[in-house]
Image (tube, rainbow, N blue to C red):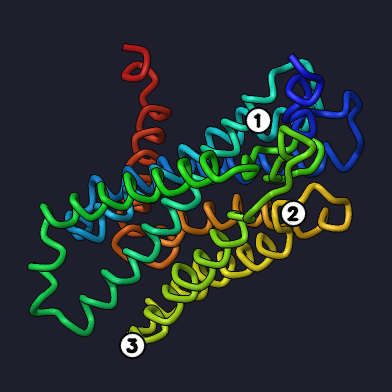
Amino acid sequence: MSNSTSTFGQELLGRNHVTSTDIIVGSSIALFAGLQLVCGSVNLWILSKVKIFQNAFGTISASRTTVDMLSSLLHISYSSYVTLSQRSDYPSYLAIAAGNLGYVFATISCGLHVLLAMNRFTSVYFPMKYALVFSRRNCVRIIAALVVGLSSFVLLSYNLVPCNVIGYGAAHYGYIMLSCSDPNHERPFHFGRLVNWLCGTFFCFGAIVMDAATIRKLYVLKSFSQNIPMFIEIIFLTLGDNSPDDSKALERTVSFILTRFTDLINTTTIIIFNPEARSFLFKRMNRVTAGSSMAGNHPEVANY
């Protein structure tokens, strides 16, 4: 085995010593991912119990929340851990697998975000066609097509286009594109730039345009809370260019942490902006509080 082959992907591993920046970045990743998992669980509970969400909007929202939770599980178990520990005694293919999965989850979440914007837009401007376009069967088919299509697009493109393999760099705080396994070869095409441009142009900007066109004030507020952080995240992702260079460190780090923050924002919007969701939560909280008070006043019941 050649030396270039044996060291392929080594830039993704830790540096074997931990700095204060590692602790700050790793803790931030774990914090946002952990909060997203908690809020995501509450969100799925609300979507399954509140009748107003028993429709296409609820199905799409639950799908996006699930994808974001899978992403958070990945980053709290891998990305934050390797960032905090800076270990280098593990195979680089784990970092490559984490990078591929992370990109797949982010791309699917982005696609579902646009689908939600289309759902809101259709309900306001084409209410008579809404039930037909977003029937239960169509909704499931669209979501399945998005998941399969976007996953295949990311996985096949990054791994079939020569010298475009990506992974999570523990010491770089983000996704970086590996050097060619053969040092005599040069990268023929930077696929990551195309993906970032497509996501920023068609997904993020498209969602902003559709939400801006939706005349209801509630949706406009949701558009700001969800689309703006995502749009800023894509800008930094594009500026970072999946490069391991120190000159791109700020853009790369901000982009990665903003993605975790955006996942959290996406999960909490229903709780914050929807009165039915808030009412459901408050009623359950009051019921639990009342039950605890009664148990405290009648200890013999609690000990029964």
| Circle 2 SS class | helix
Image coordinates for residue 58, horizontal then vertical, percent? 26, 55
Residue at image location 28% in from the left, 50% down from the top: 47
Q: Earlier in the sequence, mark 2 or mark 1?
A: 1
Closer-to-camera residue (243/223): 243
Q: Earlier in the sequence, mark 1 or mark 3?
A: 1
Q: Which residue is mark 3?
A: 215
Dot 2 and dot 1 residues touching (CB under 8 Å)? no
Residue at image location 66% in from the left, 34% down from the top: 79
Characterize the local packing of mark 1: few (<14), some (14-19) or many (20 or more) Cα atoms within 10 angstroms.
many
Q: Which residue is mark 1?
A: 95
Image coordinates for residue 43, horizontal then vertical, percent? 38, 48
Disc 2 to disc 3, C-alpha distance: 35 Å
- Of marks 2 and 3, the one in the foreground: 2
| Circle 1 SS class | helix
Res. 207 image quadrant: bottom left
Residue 233 left/right relative to 183:
left
Amino acid at pointer 1: Ala
Amino acid at pointer 2: Arg
Residue at image location 35% in from the left, 33% down from the top: 294
Res. 23 image quadrant: top right
- Image: 61 above or below 175: below
Disc 1 to disc 3, C-alpha distance: 44 Å
Q: Which residue is mark 2?
A: 252
Amino acid at pointer 3: Ile
> What is the tally of numbered marks visible in this picture?
3
- Image: 138 above or below 73: below
Image coordinates for residue 102, horizontal then vertical, percent? 55, 41
Closer-to-camera residue (23/282): 23
